[in-house]
């Protein structure tokens, strides 16, 4: 029999409803898996008492016979989401000890559906990173290993703890956030499904901000169906978030027919970049063939401003970060540096931020302050915003020409080893986002689906990009791709 913690959400939902096992038993299985997986460093704050209390409440609700889809399902929460009474640090020392007196809208929706909170998951500090190596908790390791190589690999980032926890069966699903690829890249590296919804589909209230015009919450799960179930629960307008949209939330799971006959899938020529792994390129071609075999019409398209996306993103995101992170000053909450009596308040600010922010966060804050400064605003920030408009127009023109979705690689390579990308070469790390940042700049939905293995036995993912508010159709495209790919590989347990 499959271990309870290894079930999908869909399987768990069925088992809970027919009383094959209880929510408490399912939760205990996940808590045991978490306790045995310390080597991954995926779960940074455990909440066993809270989890068991929520599981007991879910069992009572299940016994009444009208439980929602997620009732009794154990989930992990990225440390970027504020959770009432539970440490929420955004993996940063500057928020050391911060325990919010409120719950983020997304997690409140999940708990309202009866889901169970197992704990908080590791991530890059303030979601700034692509490998979960900038965390104040230390790096998170992937449950995957290269064949014949015991070096620990990155699960991706910034939602690396979420990806590792789902891939290692520590939880049945997890929340993530995506500012430039932070759901899709770790999903691809870790052999799971991750979807970034349309900007505004999920509320950002109660999520620690990185770049407010780019950040979006989304689910990370073992299957497309599980992701659809989670996304429905997470979505919806929120009066506390002015950027959340008053769009109806469809039944995403009901849209999963697998029938994509007549759909037009675009393949952008600009994504054939120098340095793209031959294995990724081959998988991309295979994905194209799989969608065509499923009945879609696959056509070549052009997104001409793609090459400007990465530099534009790394101007806009740090600019917004420098503004958002200005609030962390050591006065109201979090870290305050110890200084001699009589030190000036500016000295306290400087010492606190120097001690509390890691090197990558400091780098991005300084970049952001620079591009927003007098004399450089027009040359950098304003130009980047103009490029952003052109990138958005590229997608609009492709969709207006009859393309329903766009197929691209999710990452330029398989997962790399922790420490393999030098800390003093940030641009090499930023290149991990080359296929994902365009989607955030344009505010579109996109999903990463595991579609194959590398020669070293590591997961490889493909990305599908959809039209605004078109998550239902996009998930069905992904469902067809998932079925055609038949990805069933699991990491061999070493932790």
Image: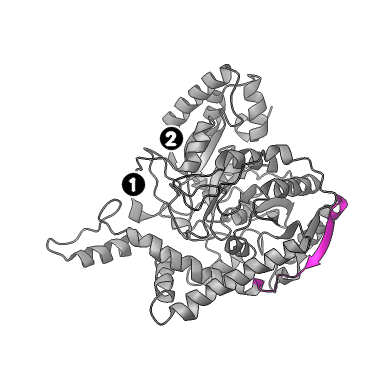
Q: Quadrant of residue 86?
A: top left
Name the residue beneath numbered marker 1: 98
Closest to the observer, 340 or 421: 340
Q: Please tell me the numbered disc located at residue 70.
A: none
| Residue designated by label 2 | 47
In the rendered image, residue 268 lying in the magenta stretch gets the answer no
**The C terminus: image quadrant:** top right
* Sequence-earlier tag: 2 or 1: 2
The answer, for residue 86, to whether it is visible in the render is yes
Q: Identify the residue at horizontal 49%, vertical 22% (top origin).
A: 56
Residue 115 located left or right of residue 46 = right
Q: Residues within 10 Å of mark 1 (few under 14, many from 20)?
A: some
Secondary structure under tag 1 reads loop
Q: Nearer the viewer, residue 485 or 374?
A: 374
Give the residue at x 39% y 72%: 369
Where residue 383 sits: x, y (%)? 53, 77
User: What residue do we see at 45% from left, 58% from top?
Assistant: 210
Q: Which mark is nearer the camera, 2 or 1? A: 1
The N terminus - image quarter:
top right
Asked whether residue 159 appears in the rendered view, the answer is no
Residue span colored magenta = 292-306
Pointer 2 with pointer 1, Cβ within 8 A: no
Q: CA distance from mark 2 to mark 1?
A: 16 Å
Crowding near pointer 2: few (<14 within 10 Å), some, many (20+)? Answer: some
x and y percent of residue 483 in the render? 78, 44
């Amino acid at each position: 029999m499959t271990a309870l913690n290894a079930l999908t959400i869909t399987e768990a939902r069925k088992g809970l409803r027919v009383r094959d096992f209880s929510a408490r038993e399912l939760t205990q299985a996940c808590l045991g898996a978490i306790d045995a997986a310390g080597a991954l460093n995926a779960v940074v704050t455990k909440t066993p008492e809270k989890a068991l209390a929520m599981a007991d409440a879910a069992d009572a609700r299940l016994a009444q016979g009208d439980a929602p889809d997620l009732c009794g399902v154990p989930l992990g929460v990225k440390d970027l989401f504020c959770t009432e009474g539970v440490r929420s640090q955004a993996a940063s020392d500057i928020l050391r000890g911060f325990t919010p007196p409120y719950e983020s809208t997304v997690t409140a929706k999940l708990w309202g559906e009866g889901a169970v909170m197992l704990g908080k998951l590791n991530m890059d500090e303030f979601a700034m990173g692509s490998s979960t190596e900038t965390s104040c908790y230390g790096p998170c390791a992937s449950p995957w290993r290269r064949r014949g190589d015991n070096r620990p690999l990155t699960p991706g980032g910034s939602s690396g703890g979420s990806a590792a926890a789902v891939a290692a069966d520590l939880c049945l699903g997890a929340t993530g956030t995506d500012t430039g690829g932070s759901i899709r890249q770790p999903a691809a590296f870790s052999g799971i499904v991750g979807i970034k919804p349309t900007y505004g589909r999920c509320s950002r209230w109660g999520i620690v901000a990185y770049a407010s015009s780019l950040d979006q919450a989304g689910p990370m799960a073992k299957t497309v169906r599980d992701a659809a179930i989670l996304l429905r629960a997470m979505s919806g307008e929120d009066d506390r978030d002015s950027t959340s949209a008053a769009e109806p939330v469809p039944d995403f799971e009901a849209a999963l027919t697998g029938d994509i006959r007549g759909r037009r899938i675009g393949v952008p020529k600009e994504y054939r970049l120098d340095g793209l792994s031959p294995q990724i390129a081959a998988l991309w071609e295979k994905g194209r063939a799989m969608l065509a075999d499923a009945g879609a019409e696959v056509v070549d398209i052009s997104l001409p401003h793609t090459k400007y996306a990465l530099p534009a993103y790394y101007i806009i995101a740090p600019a917004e970060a420098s503004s958002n992170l200005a609030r962390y000053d050591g006065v109201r909450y979090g870290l305050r540096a110890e200084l001699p009596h009589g030190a000036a308040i500016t000295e306290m600010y400087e010492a606190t931020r120097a001690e509390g922010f890691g090197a990558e966060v400091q780098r991005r804050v300084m970049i952001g302050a620079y591009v927003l400064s007098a004399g450089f605003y027009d040359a950098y920030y304003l130009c980047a915003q103009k490029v952003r408009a052109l990138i958005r127009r590229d997608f609009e023109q492709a969709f207006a020409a009859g393309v329903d979705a766009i197929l691209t690689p999710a990452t330029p390579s398989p997962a790399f080893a922790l420490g393999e990308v030098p800390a003093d070469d940030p641009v090499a790390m930023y290149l991990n986002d080359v296929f994902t940042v365009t989607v955030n700049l344009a505010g579109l939905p996109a999903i990463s689906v595991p579609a194959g293995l590398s020669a070293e036995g590591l997961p490889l993912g493909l990305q599908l990009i959809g039209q605004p508010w078109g998550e239902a159709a996009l998930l069905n495209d992904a469902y067809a791709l998932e079925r055609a790919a038949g990805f069933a590989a699991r990491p061999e347990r070493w932790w």
